[in-house]
Image (cartoon, rainbow, N blue to C red):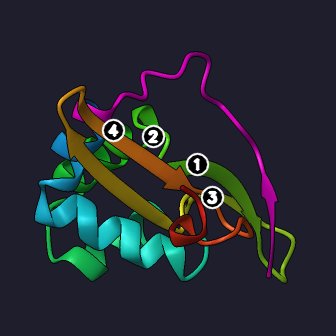
Amino acid sequence: MSTQASDTRTESTTNPATQLDVLGDDCARTILVATSEGPKTAKELTERTDSSSATVYRRINNLLESDLIAECVRFEDDGSHTTAYEATVDSLRVRIDADGIEVAVSEPNEPDLSDRE
């Protein structure tokens, strides 16, 4: 099995409030954790979350719009392919100060956020 990234987003709506709202949902957090282990199909995510497929697709769309996951194509050994989703972040840091709330995102293969100041 192999994966090939396929960015299908046209415009990013990433902002701290949106990312925090999305992460406030247990199903979305479960999807993010599952996709951090490697690309997962919507069917696999539905099984993992014990949620309905409609709920999983709504959470997938929220995570895509927040740039926390990305869509990719997963090729199977038999030559077939399917849409899958993978996490685009390794960690988030939330900083609250007089200027407001800042969310810093660390993408896979980037240095740990704790090294940045």
Q: Which residue is mark 3?
A: 107
What residue does disc 2 label? 64
Secondary element at tag 2: helix
Is residue 91 part of the magenta span, yes or no?
Answer: no
Does 19 sit left or right of 75 as displayed?
A: left
The answer to whether residue 81 is above or below residue 15 is below
Q: Residue at x 60, y 69 (%)?
A: 115
Q: Which mark is in front, 4 or 3?
A: 4
Element class at badge 1: strand
Q: Say which residue label 1 marks.
A: 70
**Of the residues shown, which amino acid type is indicated by label 3?**
Glu
Q: Position of residue 86 (x, y in %)?
A: 57, 62
Q: Main secondary structure of the magenta part?
A: loop
Can you tell which quarter of the image residue 111 is in? bottom right
Task: Report, in whole angstroms, how far the alpha carbon at label 4 lies from the one at label 3.
Answer: 16 Å
What is the secondary structure assignment of the residue under circle 3? loop
Q: Left of 59 or right of it: where is 65?
A: right
Question: Camera-side residue: 8 or 104?
Answer: 104
- The amino acid type of the residue labelled 1 equals Ala
Q: CA distance from mark 2 to mark 4?
A: 20 Å
Q: Disc 1 and disc 2: Cα gap in Å? A: 6 Å
Q: Earlier in the sequence, mark 1 or mark 2?
A: 2
